[in-house]
Image: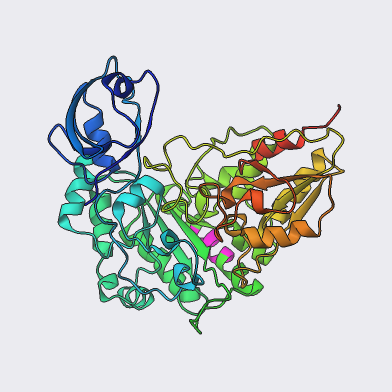
Amino acid sequence: MTLPRVVAVAPGSPAARAGLQMGDQIVAMDGQLPRDVIEYQLLADQPVLEFELRRGGLEMSVMVEREGGEPLGIEVDAALFDRVRTCDNHCEFCFIHQLPKGLRRSLYVRDDDYRLSFLYGNFTTLTRFTEADLERVVTEGLSPLWVSIHATDPEVRSRMLRNRRGATSLRWLRALLDHGIEVHGQVVVCPGVNDGPTLDDTLAGVLDRFPELASVACVPLGVSRFNTEASMRPHTQSEAGAVVDLVEDWQQTFIQAIGRHLVYASDEYYLLCGRPFPPLVAYGDVAQHDNGVGMARSFEAGFHGSLDVPAGGPGGFFQSVDGAPAAGYRAPRAAGSVTLRPRRSAGVTVLTGAYGADVIRPLVLSVRPDAEVLPVANSFFGGNIGVAGLLTGCDLADALQKAPLGRRYLLPDVCLSGGRFLDGLGPEDLPRPVEVVPADGASLRTALAVGVDG
């Protein structure tokens, strides 16, 4: 158990008026040491709150009074103050197992913690879930949660997780739904493992056992060049098309049975098989946007000004453990934009991943025919990794080294966490200046407008 540390105090806030300072360690709040930022927020919501602090080796007490529901005004340094509940599964398709050595330690954390599911949208398998966890989730209303299903057949799921508890842990999903907790599911589809008839059986199991699920996303596994599992491979075009066909068939079944689509194929599947995306309305509330479901249509709508896309969100594969606000993805997140003053006549190039280029290029050229979209190959991870969120500084540097001087280079913020790329480099290490732009359509269109008609 570590003590939460104050990393920011808002000027004029109740905490500032009471004398809290950056660097203070919180020993207790009203006599209780919170286990995580969830308990911290519940305690911080009191109108009068006594802090026991440790400052420079000295212990002190501070009384904080809040007026009219005003925010407490401090930010703490972590989401969890006790140990992260790590994952004891050994999934063949786990991307963290495919990371090379030498990256930041935080990137190798494999969590299976329902609290990080609530805070950040991490997917949990529920194999380490307990009665006490269920009681806390229900009592504190920790909803929504995000659960990895992968297969509803107990033997298949246990085999995929390489954990015998995988055969029984979906009982907790049933319990969560019985208590009215909103849950979103995920199926990572692995060719020859849980696609085809097994995926068909899984979706039948969802309808039979878990029809109250808010959504289920079918996403393809990522296979990097560091993969050591011989049975794990990318989808072929025909296999991707078969997944789309199966999902769309089941959508019609779900509409007839429960009045909504429930299951969705990720955008990557449509790109892999070369089919157009469904209309935005087909994605409902686009709840699994950050899992790559409906992202392209949302981006397109935001670009054309027909959808107000909020900034923030989990954003990026590893934001949950490195660089995210302690309060989770619902907290405001700075865009991290780099403010430059480019020449108004400068040409513009949009940097993105291989998958994003196909979506972004027609939008960019519709408003800036002189612009370019530069897809950056992910040589660092290799394999079928083509999303912008996994771009590294070294690959961006290679692409920009060959790019002309004097242009504006726009980079989506989704590939940065705490101002760093996954390989530890930062924008300042790139051979060309870049402008970091929030990864939504409206922000990109605003950035493209600089220098137009002027």
Q: Toward the viewer: 410 or 161?
A: 410
In the image, is residue 246 part of the stretch drawn in magenta? Answer: yes
Task: Give the position of the C terminus as an image quadrant.
Answer: top right
In the image, is residue 55 part of the stretch drawn in magenta? Answer: no
Residue lying farthest left? Answer: 31
Q: Is residue 394 left or right of residue 399?
A: left
Q: As displayed, is residue 348 above or below residue 216?
A: above
Q: As displayed, is residue 115 above or below residue 32?
A: below
| Quadrant in the rendering for residue 423 | bottom right
Q: Is residue 295 left or right of residue 8?
A: right
Residue lying farthest top? Answer: 68
The magenta span reads: 244-250
Q: Position of residue 20 (x, y in %)?
A: 29, 27
Q: As displayed, is residue 177 above or below residue 444?
A: below
Q: Position of residue 431 (x, y in %)?
A: 73, 54
Q: Is residue 86 visible in the rendered structure shown here?
A: yes
| Quadrant in the rendering for residue 363 | top right
